Image (tube, coloured by chain):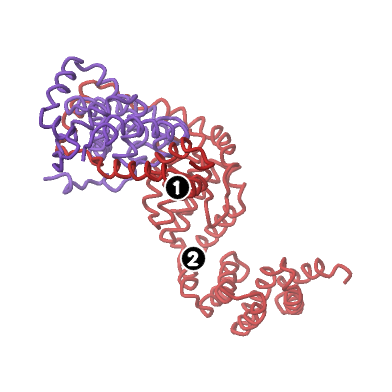
Amino acid sequence: MTTENCDTIQEMMSQRLYETLEQPEEIRVSEHLSRCTECTGEWEKMQAWVDTMPNETPHTQFDLWPSVRSSITEQKTFTFPWKRLVVSGVMGFGVGMVGLGLLSRISTQDTTVQVAEEIPTIFEKAEEYRTQLHYQKARELLGGFLEVHPDSPDSGKAQMILARISFEDLENFKLAHGEYELLQKRYPQEFARNAQHVYRLNLLDEAQSQDSGYTVLERLNRARESSSIIDLERVVADFPGTFMADEAVMAMVESVSDGLNEDEIQTAMNSLVAQCTHPVAQTYVQLGVANHYQNQASHTDMVIGLYETVAQSEVPELALQAREQLAKHIPSE
Amino acid sequence: MTLDDTHTPYSDRADEALAMACQSGDSNAFEEIVYRYQHLMYRVAFRMTSNQEDAMDATQDALVKAWQNIQKWKPTHSFRSWLLRLTANQAVDQARKSNRKRQKEVAVDSWTPEMEAAGSDAESKVTPDSAQFEQRLNLALQRVSDMQRKVFIMRHFEQLSLKEISDVLECTTGSVKVHLHRAVKKLRKEFGPETQDWR
């Protein structure tokens, strides 16, 4: 007999048998068993019992569908929810607003959808598909939900995730554009809640204005995937002052800074700027790098140096931005 | 054509996508659900009722009810858990409805002298055949409460997680643990070395 109550431990052993013990309980049981021969004997009996228990149910071949189909056809009890769909068209906007309450419980970070415990299964499943890169399945799931439940309090969230997934797919920007437009139209407050939605819609609008095939975005993605500084710089040079150029600069910064420590960043950024051959693009890159690191105290000197360079550049719009930034960093000047 | 060969446009869809299609009246989606779950439902029903006919009836009735009540399923919940809940409840009802006399006869008939010998002979090295094991196990399962039986079947035979069992039974995982412990304790007495050398 040990200090720990054997009855309590033996209760836990049933759970241990089925691997449902939490870690602290598991430790308690293990420690007790190491000292108590009586419970160790009981544990061995339990293991022998469960090992010998049949753990499968004998297989029986059958197909219930013909009889089930017959039953559900005869009864004809199902009614299609036409009324609800019609009503939903009228109520969709108002109910979408209610959905915001649920949204407030989840993170809307760009790269991950933080799924809280209470978040519905359908969103967990969509997120699972997303992480497995099964975008089409995720879209079908969310699209099906929105088709059948346009008036659900969760519809806004479904539309938001659908738009996000469509954008991340990178296969069909036209589709992603449509989803973001729908998000803006049907769930305006939800759309405006996350700056990323606004940014992406602006990006898609801008790309569409260049050509309806969104080839600029495809070009940007190819350059990003290959981490080609030259190709990314061409995007900046060809579309200066656009969201696409901003994307390209950020892709360049991420590409050359990946895995570096704080001390190596400045050298990498100097190297990046030096690689740029197009003068306007180079100025954009300098400003982009400065903006990217402006809130990191360890890079203040580099940031101020870059802003000063851009402030003296021959690109008036960028020079003005740089001077405004310098005024924030050095108020006395 | 076997079930394994069957591939429909619905085969790749998630349960919840199928269920939502059913809510729109798509019976083809429901057909996929039937193919996907009828055997799991039957296994649960069989362990609940210990009777093949009752299990088959319970499975079919649960499927019909699932279709009739598909609007009650909420996409915010697991469809599989909802279906298993219908199945387990239907199986309990089916067992109650079925002829008690017939059940008793089956129970008595199944307990053969050979089984008795195998069960009571402490020195026996003969392993009882699986059919006898099955019958004895099914009898033992009928000696625990409905809730304990549901929990034990879902964990032991179907390896459902505590969370999923709690979803199916609409209770806490703590409650599932308690039922599991009680089921194991009772089943060991009914069907184990404590009462007989059964190996």
> In x, y percent, where is residue A160?
51, 47
Q: Amino acid at mark 2?
A: Leu
Task: Specify which label sits upstream in the sequence, 2 or 1.
Answer: 1
Chain letter of mark 2 equals A
Chain letter of mark 1 equals A
Mark 2 element type = helix
> In x, y percent, where is residue A285?
63, 75
Give residue A33's mark.
1
Query: Which quadrant, please, contains the C terminus of chain B?
Result: top left
Q: Give the side of residue A7 with respect to residue B52, left or right.
A: right
Mark 1 element type = helix
Residue at the extreme right: A332
Count of numbered labels shown in the rendering: 2
| Residue B132 vs residue A231, the one in the foreground | B132
When the figure is inspected, residue A168 is found, relative to residue B154, above or below; the finding is below
Q: Residues within 10 Å of mark 2 (few under 14, many from 20)?
A: many
Q: Give the side of residue A114 with respect to residue A212, left or right.
A: right
* Res. B57 in view: yes
Residue at (46% x, 40% y) in the render = A9
Q: Colour of chain A?
A: red
Give residue A217's mark.
2
Which chain is drawn using purple? B
* Disc 2 and disc 1 in contact, CB within 8 angstroms: no
Q: Residues within 10 Å of mark 1 (few under 14, many from 20)?
A: some
Q: Place residue A173 in its image quadrant.
A: bottom left
> In x, y percent, where is residue A106?
57, 45
* Res. B20 in view: no
